[in-house]
Amino acid sequence: MNISNRNTINLKNKMVTIIGLGKSGCGAAKLAHYLKANVFVSEQTGGIELKQNLRKIQSIGMEGEIEGHSEKIFDADLWVISPGIHQNASIIVKAKERNIPIVGEIEFSSWFTSAPILAITGSNGKTTTAYALTEMCKTKEIHGVLAGNVGIPFSEKILEDLKSPDSKRIFILEISSFQMEFILHFKPYISLLLNITPDHLDRYESMEEYKSAKFNMIQNQSSDDMIIFNADDPSFDNQFDGYPPVKISFSLYKKENAIFSVNQSKIYTKENDKLIYLNEIVLAGKHNLSNLLAAATVAHFMHIPNKHIEKIMASFTGVPHRLESVITLQGVDYVNDSKATNIDSVKVALDSFNKSIILILGGQYKGGDFKELLPHANNIKTVLAYGQAHQTIETALGDAVRLYTFNSLKDAVSKSHLLASPGDIVLLSPGCASFDQFDSFEHRGDLFKQWVSQLEEQK
C-alpha cells in the first residue's frame, strides 16, 4: 500500500493490522473498520480487559487475537501500532523486511481530518497544559476537543467527527515521544514544546535519541505553522534554527518575543494591560504558572479573547492524578500525584509544599538518578519505596533519608498511615512507570485514592 501521498490514501478493502488492543488500538481498529478496511487486531498479552476489548471488536465484524502474535499479522497492506510497542521489537523488524508500511495511531488518525491540530509535548506538564488549553478553546467560534496521550484516542475523536462533522473543530493533542516514533505526514498547526528532562531512558539509549523522538513532532511543519516553546528551558536553545514555522516563546522571566509576561503581582500583555492577577489563579506552583502561560500563548494565536483566557486561568483547578488532593485524615493531607512518572516530576511535587512530607516512590524503573531528589528533600520526613524499583531507590536515598521498602503500593499506604502526624502530607509521587503492578498511572492513582478512603473507614 502506498501511503506517500496523504490525500490519496484509501483504506477500502485494504488489509489493516492493528498491533495492540488497548485504548488506542481499539480506537484505530474502529476507525479503520468504519473506513471499510479489513481489520485484524493482535495483542501480545492477555487479561480480562483485553478479552473484553477483543469481544467488542469481534461483535462489530473485525477479527483479532490476544496472548500472542500469529503469522496472520503479516498478511497486511498497513500496520497501525500502539505507542507501547518498541520501535525495535522483533515483529516490527519483520514487518519492515516485508515492506509493510508502519504508522502510529496518531499519524493514522491525522490522515482523516483537515481540522487544525494543536500538539503539546514535553517531559512534564503536558496533561495540565492540554486540559487548560482545551478549556480555553471552547467558545462559540472554536470547538476544541482533547485527545492523545491523556487516555483519549485521537482515532476515537476523528471517528466521532466523521460521523458528525463540525466545521469549528480543532484538536488539542497531548503527544508522547512514543507516539512520534512512526510518523510520516503528521503536521500540527501549532507545536507547543514545554520542556525536556531525562525520561524514558529505559526505552531510549540516550537523551539525544529521546529529544529526537520529541522533535519529530515539528518535522513536517511549514512556514504557515507555528512552534511555541519554553524560553526558560535551555534544551530549546537554537534547536529550531532552520525550521520554517514561525517561532514564539513563552517565559516566566523573559519578555522578548513573549505574548504574555509576568511580574510579582500579575500576568500582563504586550500592551502592558493586565491579563490576570496572580492571586486570582487557583492552580498553585510556579510550574503550573508556566503551563498556563504556555496554554494562553497558544490560545492567543487561536484568536481566543483575553477575557476568556483570564476566566479559565481563574477557574482551572488542575487534572486528576497530578498533585490531586484526596482527603485530610486527622490533620494529615493525602495527595495523589500518580502522573509523576519521572524524577523531575517528583522534584516539582516536592517543591510545591512547605509541610513535612511522607513520600511514596516506586513502580517500574524508567532510568534516571533518584539522588537528584536530595536537593529537594529538605521537608521529606520519610520515603516509602515500593515495587520493582524499591531497591534502586533504597540504594540511592537510603543513607540520606529515613526509608522503608515494600513490595506493594498498598502496603506502603498502610505504613504511611502509621507514620503520619497532624500537619504532614502523604504524597504519592512515584517517579516511575506504573506497569509493574498497574494498568496505567490512572489505575495506580485510583487505587491509591481507594486505599486512602479505606483508611478513613478504619478510624
Image: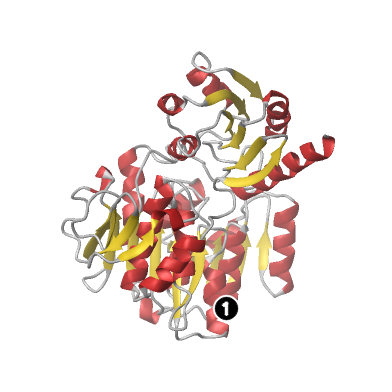
Query: What amino acid is at disc 1?
Result: Glu
| Camera-nearest residue between 205 and 261 | 261
**Residue projecting furthest to the right:** 458
Q: Is residue 36 above or below residue 18?
A: below
Which residue does the numbered mark 1 point to in the structure image?
160
255 left or right of 150? left
User: Measuring 30% from the left and 61% from the top, which residue is drawn there?
Assistant: 268
| Camera-nearest residue between 219 and 336 | 336
| Camera-nearest residue between 4 and 363 | 363
Name the quadrant of the N terminus.
bottom left
Coordinates of residue 283 in the picture (x, y in percent): 49, 53
User: Residue 429 occupies which quadrant of the picture?
Assistant: top right
Coordinates of residue 399 in the picture (x, y in percent): 50, 13
User: Residue 107 occupies which quadrant of the picture?
Assistant: bottom left
Q: According to the image, what is the colour scheme of the structure?
A: secondary structure
| Camera-nearest residue between 391 and 424 | 424
Q: Is residue 112 above or below residue 364?
A: below
Coordinates of residue 89 in the picture (x, y in percent): 48, 46
159 left or right of 439? left
